[in-house]
Amino acid sequence: MFPVIASLLLSENLPQPVQPPPNFDQAAVVKFSQVPLVAQAVAPEADQQAAMTAPNPANPVPAQPTAPVMTEVFQSQQVRPLPGHLDKVPVFNSNSPEMVRSEGILLSTFPPQGKRSPAAHLNFPLQGRFDLFAHHVTQANRPHDLTTLYLGILLYNPSQSTVTVNLQQAASFLSTPDAPFRNLPAVVDNPIGYVFSGPGSRVMTQVLRGQRQRHFPGQIVIPAGESRMLVNLPIPVPKLRLARSRPPAAAQLLVNQVGEIQPFAPWMNEFPIQNQTPSSNGRSTFMQLQTTGPIYAASMAMYSRLNPDRTERAPALQDWQTMLVNGRLASPRDIPPTPPERQSVRIYYGRVAGISQGSAWQAKLTDKPNAADLTIPRLGQAFSYGISTLPRGTLGTGQVQSAPMLARYPDTAYFANGNYGVHYNLDLPLYNPTRQVQAVAVSIQTPLKQDQLRAGLDFLNPPAPQIFFRGTVRLGFNDDFGQNQVRYVHLVQRRGQRGEPLTTVNLQPGERRNVEVDFLYPPDATPPQVLTVSTLLASNTITTQKPAPANSPQGQLSQN
């Protein structure tokens, strides 16, 4: 999971992140069995901030709140392997080193011939459909050294014909100021993409909605034997701001002519306190691309160049070409991964730098292969499917969903663990075989990572403070009034969090109803998760949707 880069929000009207107490004991857990599932509303987390009062005989110092004791909760339920598999689409995956402290090559698929550092080039041409993911962070080495680092992604056409690169979807955001990490509720409806926390959350929300930022062209034409820049974007380190906050602004929709949400949403107050030494910032980028011929690609890091008047300028194409030929791999490097064959107690997965295979996982979840239905669980019971399972974290399924690496550097991850940017597109054809109306909930959960299970999942109550999932999920289904609904829901889940229902539908006796769940696995997440279907005890649970007005556009969320 990426480290939290953004500073605290300044607005005094917004909730502040809750920090774990200094004497927090994560080992203080007690196991007990979980009662059957019951349809009930989940109360918001209690405010754990206590007011500090100066010592005064007439006003004694209040007792400090005790650290919450996390209880390990065992939920007895079946965990199934996820049907389907990753597709064969290659992914240019640039995430190591995550923290970039020097200029250099981050990932190059160019051939090594004629290069000063042949080991920096993986010799893997890309052609046709492929994805591109890059996330890197920079940090000021000294408080007053705020030279801007640039992320450059260069494309080269080695053929004798012109190659066109089509940008189907593309987004790139900075942690500051574009997408700070906010303390959001566990579930927030996100009908127009306004809700996000961190650059990975925002990038994947944009691409999930099929959008391309305006500063990216629809296509890039590369003549034979020539190069073009796909990305040449800054990662500036924040400068010192003396103001504690800005005045609250009225809520308004900042939507441009093509329907994109602008970087600043006043009602969310995006201005963080800046330049807490050492100052840092990060950029997440994700694209879905299609080429008409072969290309080579390289991501590189370079500090801004200086104009004669000492002002900064972005590196030019020639600067990047020079680095490609004469540069070395950026350093320092990340911790190398544990070899898969080594049976050590502790495992380092490593970070990814290379070409992974698999951009999408599409599946129809049914009782068995070639079946038509997914029979709902018995009353008060549930079953789950693993999401983004990985070595030593298969949740008892034995299924590793991590994308294999087609090309990689020796000190980087053996698999694309986490499947950042992979599009999970899952169809649930629910079927109620009983003679009673059944309330069925669909949810995403973040259980404790395990490889061997004892007929169920382990959660924490309350969940641990570490956030393990933040991103947008899209739901498609017919509600209880027969209206087609498309909902975008932003989730924030902590380690061991059971999660709230994404939707609850009331199935009539013998009724069949499809629920579609799809999302791009967000890079600000730590796997694994599960997709859970549960039949609630309370049969009178209302639907999560009211009937949509006849003139409402498809996909517009009806208010509860």
Image (spheres, helix red, strand yellow):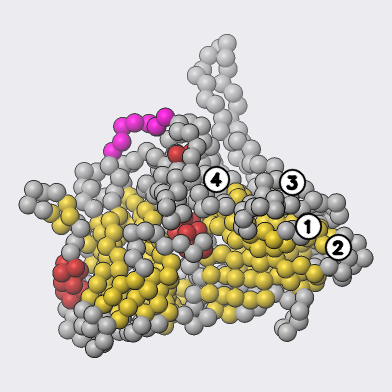
The percent position of residue 437, horizontal first and vertical second, equals 87, 60
Quadrant assignment, res 535: bottom right
Residue at 49% from the left image edge and 83% from the top image edge:
88
Q: From the image, state whether disc 2 or disc 4 is nearer to you.
A: 2
SS type, badge 3: loop
Residue at 70% from the left image edge and 53% from the top image edge:
550
Report how far apart the C-alphas of labels 2 and 1 lie in the structure.
9 Å
Answer yes or no: do the residues labelled 2 and 4 have beta carbons within 8 Å? no
Tell me the kind of residue under disc 1.
Answer: Asp
Residue at 60% from the left image edge and 35% from the top image edge:
47
Q: Which residue is mark 2?
A: 508
Q: From the image, state whether disc 1 or disc 4 is nearer to you.
A: 1
The percent position of residue 126, horizontal first and vertical second, equals 36, 82
Answer yes or no: do the residues labelled 3 and 2 have beta carbons within 8 Å? no
Q: Is residue 495 left or right of residue 304?
A: right
Q: Earlier in the sequence, mark 2 or mark 1?
A: 1
Q: Which residue is mark 1?
A: 480
Q: Earlier in the sequence, mark 4 or mark 3?
A: 3
Vertical comparison of 351 with 445: above or below: below
Residue at 91% from the left image edge and 62% from the top image edge:
436
Tell me the kind of residue under disc 3.
Answer: Ala
Q: Earlier in the sequence, mark 3 or mark 1?
A: 3
Report how far apart the C-alphas of labels 3 and 2 lie in the structure.
22 Å
Q: Is 300 one of the magenta-colored residues?
A: no
Q: Which residue is mark 3?
A: 41
Question: Would you say residue 77 is visible in this rendering?
Answer: no
Question: Would you say residue 483 is visible in this rendering?
Answer: yes
Q: Start and end of the magenta stretch?
A: 240-247
Q: Which residue is mark 4?
A: 184
Q: Main secondary structure of the magenta part?
A: loop
Q: Is 243 one of the magenta-colored residues?
A: yes
